[in-house]
Amino acid sequence: MQRASVMSAAELAYRFRQVLVDSKERVRHALSLGGPPKAEDPSSLTSLLRPDARQLFVPAYERSAADEGLLLSGKVAVFGQWLMVGSDAEFWHRDPLSGAVWPRRPFRQLDYRPGNSTGDVRVVWELNRLQHLFALAVLADQDPSRRGGAIAVIERQLAGWEAANPTGIGVNFISAMEEALRLVALFHTYDLVREWVSDSTRLCVGRIALSHSRHVASRLSLYSSAGNHTIAEAVGLLYAGILLRECPLAAQWRATARRLLGTEAERQIDADGGGVEQATWYLLFIVDLLGLAQALLRHSSEPPEPLLDAALERGRTFLHIMGSGPDDLPRIGDGDDGYALAAGLRISWTGGPDSPKTCSLRAAGLSVVRQGADDRLLFLHKPLGMAPNFAHGHADCLSVLFRWQGREVFTDPGTYQYGGDPEYRQHFRSTAAHNTVVIGLTDQAEQVAPFMWRHPYQSRLVVSRFETDCSWLLATHDGYKSLGSAHWRGVVYRRGHFLAIWDCVTGASQPNVAIHWNLGSPITRQDLREGYLEIGNASGPAIQLEVSGGTMSVLRGSVKPLRGWRSPSYGSVEPSDLLEIRLDHPAVQPAVTVVWLAEPRDWGQVWPLVDEFRRYVPAS
């Protein structure tokens, strides 16, 4: 009902047509009429299949010697776990982490939404993107001494995958985006090794390419579902339209892809280069995809897409402001550790020295104070996410993330997973899981489903001032207006001296107001009664935290309620230290959290700076 309530008449008609097609297919399979569709004959795809002429560019890619040895042995990595690729058909339908096997039935009959009886579908999809084959193809292309072994693994696994996945049967045909990503990986893999593979492998590539392209074109994510899925699908169609030129639908695929890539790039990358889904990992994902599309158009002497080119430039600039590379990108919002082509892809980071980045990005809703890779302050005054469902956004408005001298002080808790236990999905999206103020034990917006929010908050950056050695930021949001309250947060950062965060709650008095801080380094000393603790590690002196105006406690791995957890990568979760500061009278006595970066701890420097924020806040 929530989804239907945000759909236009055109979208409802589009959805209804899809339901009719799905219903027709269910009836056909229920009556056992014909079985799976017969695979198309790819022999007409001469430009793709001929062995003597490469059709694609080679994207910037960083090889991993350690991974290459494992790949050559027949293993594949899924979210950090290396598995031996099995010869049985069930391997490609088995969840690599839980061992659960997805039924090999027509994909329209499978329940894959969060809460299903099998597991988190995102995990098995990661395995079936076949992106590890691209890494093997790069190895075969660049290392003749190991070429034979790499080609043998590629051919064996590709044949096994096709045999285990008849068109339309099983979990790997549910998502058009997954098929599109598989297409991109398959095309780049084949193009690098085309002169060394067998004719049977050529025909296998052709059959998969034709079936996937038709399926992607018929099941595009449009209207209220348009997001990173749409861009991935459009990129897959663009590859198909350019590389499968002998197919009668190729021109239509190219036209559809170009139209979607222009409009969606313009819509999904804002004026500052941030992603409107408010999820930095997905921004990297779509920027890399758009970079592949741009390179493909140029390599194929196709006309450029100006909206795509402009959005791509904005997105890359934003990513360079945030971090020095993909592994340095701060996690904000959902992140599923997925890649446009492979983990080593570096198409959005192609060189250039790191440089200081200090600015407020009002469209993106984020302020950054950064000096190289080791010193980074982020203040989030962002929207919840992309309307109308705000799918990948987290309720983390006014959160602060802080790294100093390479040590994480305040971190984001991560995502964990999309399926599995719904309580954990709710927690990692919640306000209580993030470095901000929680009022009345509720979120800043209402969670209505694992990928939906309702009643989004509005945020506003009030003060943004940067000087040589000091930065002032103040913002507010109305996520608690139903409780009659508003949260105001001021940030003062004197690099090398201290970071001070001032929190004020105006409006109705609330019995439950707390500040949460996810600590990125271990606690080495604490005196919670005195409002003091230290965090540190072996790389340098301890960092001292001190609080005025609240009562401190530390939670770690609490189950009821869920508190003190972090997800370092998709699908993994571990206990971590959460500093909770309970506020008794936040409107009368705002709380101040100070991170001391050098001695002495002089509150006399802090109070005059944070007191400036009071004049912007209306009297309760």
Image (spheres, rainbow, N blue to C red):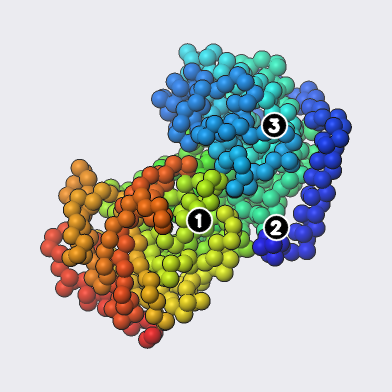
Where residue 132 appears, as percent x and y from the top left, is 53, 29
Mark 3, other Cα within 10 Å: few <14 / some 14–19 / many ≥20? some
- Under mark 2, the amino acid is Tyr
Q: Quadrant of the C terminus?
A: bottom left
168, above or below 449, in the image: above
**Mark with earlier residue (3, 1):** 3
Q: Is mark 3 on a helix, strand or loop?
A: loop
Q: Position of residue 271 (x, y in %)?
A: 53, 62
The mark nearer the N terminus, 2 or 1, is 2
Q: Residue 223 carries which label?
A: 2
Q: Nearer the viewer, residue 22 or 367?
A: 22
Q: Which mark is residue 104?
A: 3
Tag 3: amino acid: Arg
- Residue 111, percent across and down? 67, 43
Work out whether residue 84 can be spotted: yes
The disc, 3 or 2, on the residue closer to the chain's N-terminal end is 3
Q: Name the residue under label 1.
A: 426
Dot 2 crowding, Cα within 10 Å, few <14, some 14–19, many 20+: some
Occupied quadrant, residue 607: bottom left
273 relative position to 530: left or right: right
Do callouts 3 and 2 mark residues in contact (Cβ within 8 Å)? Answer: no
Hey, which residue is sitting farthest bottom in the picture? 619
Check whether the beta carbons of the residues at disc 2 and disc 1 lie within 8 A of each other: no
Is label 3 or label 2 in front? 3
